């Protein structure tokens, strides 16, 4: 099957995101509000995670094993990442839009975050871990990277208790569209 990568990027640039349903049918979705991971002083994390960071048990990489991160994100009992969406992520990766932000412990992939970068927007699609704290360290290090690279926002799409621990907050669609427009005007690079 052929995919129009420009049309897919445009869908994300309009504030939509792709998800597969329980039958693996892929559709575009929108939301009345989005969840942002703060890139300012509101970002926080548990003190126990600071100890892990201080121990430097993990190294960080970008796109060292993109496909393994996608597979890790899809490997759960209920997933919105269908085989078709995995192919689309691969094409977005090859086109310079999809990235995996990874933590490693030696030669073992510890965890990672899968995201789409369009301008100054980082749109987090999913995250996973294989080694405890792997995805949490990835989150902290990714926020540091996004700050350094002057990204406008880190869109985590939907709120959950895990993200709340990092200071995640909701943005109504009207505000999201304003920030998205600002982000699209900025040329940021994750790498």
Image (tube, helix red, strand yellow):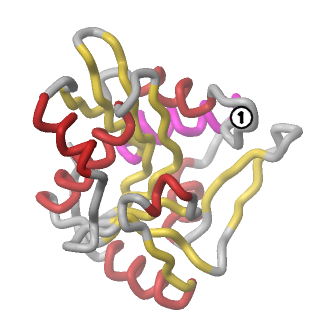
Give the left or right position of residue 44, taking residue 135 as reference.
left
Q: Quadrant of the C terminus?
A: top left
Q: Which residue is mark 1?
A: 82
**Residue nearest the viewer, comparing 160 with 64:** 160
Where is residue 5 drawn, in percent x and y? 54, 48
What secondary structure is the magenta-colored segment mainly? helix
Query: Does dot 1 land on a helix, a strand or a loop?
Result: loop
Where is residue 49 drawn, in percent x and y? 26, 43
* Magenta extent: 83-97
**Residue nearest the viewer, comparing 173 with 2:** 173
* Picture residue at 59% right of the left edge, 38% below the top: 88
- From this viewpoint, which residue is outermost toward the front? 48
Relative to 73, is 57 above or below? above
**Residue nearest the viewer, comparing 131 with 89:** 131
Q: Quadrant of residue 109?
A: top left
* Picture residue at 47% right of the left edge, 21% below the top: 68
* Picture residue at 29% right of the left edge, 23% below the top: 64
Where is residue 78 drawn, in percent x and y? 75, 37
Q: Quadrant of residue 50?
A: top left
Relative to 75, is 173 above or below? below
> Is 93 covered by the magenta stretch?
yes
């Amino acid at each position: 099957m052929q995919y129009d990568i420009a049309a897919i990027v445009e869908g994300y640039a309009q504030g939509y995101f792709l998800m597969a349903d329980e039958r693996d049918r892929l559709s575009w979705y929108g939301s009345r509000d989005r969840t942002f991971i703060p890139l300012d002083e509101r970002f926080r994390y548990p003190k126990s995670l600071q100890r892990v960071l201080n121990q430097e048990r993990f190294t960080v990489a970008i796109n060292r094993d993109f496909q393994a991160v996608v597979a890790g994100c899809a490997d759960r009992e209920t997933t919105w990442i269908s085989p078709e969406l995995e192919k689309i992520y691969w094409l977005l990766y090859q086109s310079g839009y999809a990235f995996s932000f990874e933590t490693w412990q030696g030669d073992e992939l510890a965890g990672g975050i899968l995201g789409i970068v369009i301008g100054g927007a980082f749109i987090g699609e999913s995250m996973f871990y294989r080694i405890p704290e792997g995805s949490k360290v990835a989150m902290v290090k990714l926020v540091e990277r996004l700050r350094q690279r002057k990204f406008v926002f880190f869109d985590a799409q939907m709120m959950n208790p895990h993200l709340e621990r990092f200071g995640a907050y909701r943005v109504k669609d009207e505000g999201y569209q304003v920030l998205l427009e600002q982000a699209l005007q900025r040329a940021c690079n994750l790498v």
